[in-house]
Amino acid sequence: MSFLPTTIYSVILFFFSEIIFADENAWLQDTDCKIMSSNGLQINIGSGSLISSICDRDGSAITCSHTTNDSSKFNGKPSTITNYTELKLNNEFSIWVATSHEGMIVLDIKNKRYSVTSTHLLPEGLLNKNCIGKIKEFFDK
């Protein structure tokens, strides 16, 4: 009978070890966003939705869950997942290059600020979004 509790504990530890032993998350909060879109005939510029992002790191692989702070949607959904590869410059700066879309995040870790850019090809035309924001939390070093 002592085999059963040990087995159950091992199974639970296996499935939840990533959550239990994971590094602290990174939390990014947009403070200003601008969108520039073009359909080939005209260029439109406007404000973009502010996003909160919670990111996990596994080595140099970064996965972020993004949620808008208003009623706007990502392809009809309230949140989306994106992936990046971290290019660490030093303890003060880091660059994340998107692997799930055309985009990049430049993080000023020392001053807790970041800049993000993304480009999307939509049926309506080309859309570029640029945001700046605050690093609310950053991974354990």
Image (cartoon, rainbow, N blue to C red):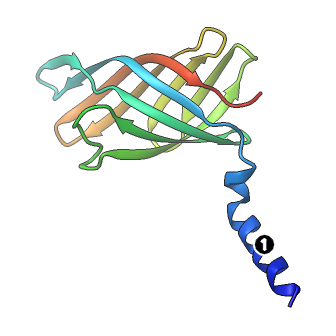
Residue 20 percent across, percent down from the top left: 71, 52
**Nearest to the observer: residue 127 or residue 137:** 137
Q: Residue at (75%, 17%) from the top-left corner?
A: 91
Find the residue positioned furthest to the bottom.
1
Residue 85 percent across, percent down from the top left: 62, 37
Q: Residue at (69%, 66%) from the top-left corner?
A: 15
Question: Label 1: few (<14), some or many (≥20) within 10 Å?
Answer: few
Disc 1: which residue: 9
Q: Is residue 114 left or right of residue 23?
A: left
Find the residue positioned furthest to the right.
2
Q: Is residue 43 left or right of residue 7?
A: left
Residue 35 percent across, percent down from the top left: 27, 21
Q: Is residue 121 left or right of residue 43?
A: right
Residue 62 percent across, percent down from the top left: 61, 40
**Nearest to the observer: residue 49 or residue 82:** 49
Q: Residue at (11%, 23%) from the top-left corner?
A: 41
**Nearest to the observer: residue 39 or residue 30:** 30
Instruction: Specify the amino acid type for callout 1.
Output: Tyr
Secondary structure at badge 1 equals helix
97 up-or-down from 48: above or below: below
109 up-or-down from 54: above or below: above
Q: Quadrant of the C terminus?
A: top right
40 up-or-down from 100: above or below: above
Q: Is residue 85 left or right of residue 23?
A: left
- The answer to which quarter of the image holds residue 132 is top left
Q: Quadrant of the N terminus?
A: bottom right
**Nearest to the observer: residue 77 or residue 106:** 77
